[in-house]
Amino acid sequence: MTRLFNFCAGPAALPTSVLERARDEMLDYQGRGLSVMEMSHRSPEYTAIAEQAERDMRELLAVPSNYRILFLQGGASMQFAMLPYNLLGQGGTPNYLYTGIWGKKAITEARHLASAHVAATSEGNGLTDVPRQEDIQLSGDAAYLHYTANETIGGLEFDYIPDVQVPLVCDMSSSILSGPLDVSRFGVIYAGAQKNIGPAGLTVAIVRDDLLELARPDTPTMFSYKVMAENDSMYNTPSTYAWYLAGLVFDWLKHEVGGLEAMDAINSRKAAKLYAAIDSSDFYSNPIATRSRSRMNVPFVLADDRLNQAFLDEAEATGLLNLKGHRSVGGMRASLYNAVPEAAVDALIAFMNDFETRRG
Ligand SMILES: *Cc1c(COP(=O)(O)O)cnc(C)c1O
């Protein structure tokens, strides 16, 4: 068996030791004679799995006790709609920062319910630099401010947490758990699991408990943070196996990586190496302003577009998978999530240098 280096933007690489443990526990979970997939979500065995995952995530991110961690479905895309239902019960205008494709989709969903205000945008610089704090102009009646910490497609990441007097909401799908975080700065954080948390099918939301009271009266039951919180994310059947795998990832982060400070240092090193390789070459380039460069998703283009397919084919033959850029931007993209080892980045840089020497 060979596991190749996988740079997929999502669903993304998972730690090999997590998959090995899942394999070992697949048919018979800890002597219970059945798989986690086959357990009742209300059984004592499964409840213990779910609660341990919640505790470990809370510990990793130092989530304060006045926040609830919800294990939901529907992806980050469903949060785009669920969020405004839950926070607009007292009216007000939803405010958004627009820095890329995911933020735009979030704005589109909010506009089904209210007239959203764009409090700052990166459109003026072609989505290559995040707005600065002083650029953020909230509307007078702002209900909340939403932003995308890391724009996965553009490769644009905030290098600061916006400071505002209204609840701050963040789509952290592609950067959560990449390093330590001051959760107390936020009202709501949400993330689809399939980048840094686990497999697809699970979405985590971290919600400050006073915000559970602000839902619109027409909020569908399954959209209600309050209903989900009151039922420990088990109002209906949760995504049990994905939740279990997320728990294994949290355990890996705690015990094998050594926590989020350690993860942060590794992630910084990986990204710095790759950007340095791109910047030192006339053949590869990345358009993002240095301060706004993503540590998780590194888009780059070749000097000659006609070499794109050869680059991808040769990379794959070398064991470097999923480097094709998003269809909307083209070029290449290397996603360097937590589970992508530093050796993968080293192998990618070696391949890029070799390709440039031969074809550049
Ligand atoms: C992947 C991603 C999404 C979409 O996630 P789904 O779970 O597929 O809905 C939204 N926002 C960001 C920042 C993402 O990276």
Image (cartoon, helix red, strand yellow):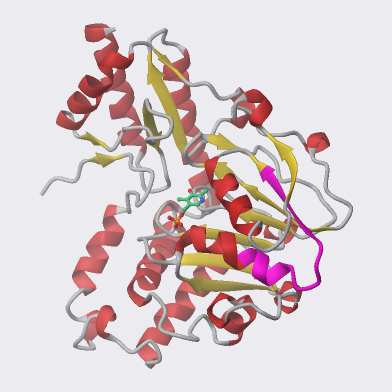
Q: Is residue 360 magenta?
A: no
Instruction: Specify start and end residues of the magenta stretch as a single range.
Output: 83-97
The spot of residue 53 in percent (x, y) is: 46, 72
Where residue 253 sits, quadrant-wise, is: bottom left
Q: Is residue 87 magenta?
A: yes
Where residue 302 sits, quadrant-wise, is: top left
Q: Is residue 197 above or below residue 25?
A: above
Note whether residue 61 is visible: no
Q: Is residue 257 above or below residue 296?
A: below
The spot of residue 311 in percent (x, y) is: 25, 22
Q: Could you tell me which residue is drawn at 51 percent across and 53 percent down?
A: 173
Of all residues, the one furthest to the right in this rendering is: 140
Note whether residue 29 is visible: yes
The spot of residue 66 in percent (x, y) is: 71, 74
* The C terminus: image quadrant: top left
Name the one closer to the observer, 231 or 113.
113
The spot of residue 196 in percent (x, y) is: 44, 53
- Would residue 139 be found to the left or right of residue 3 on screen? right
Q: Is residue 302 above or below residue 94?
A: above
Of all residues, the one furthest to the left in this rendering is: 1
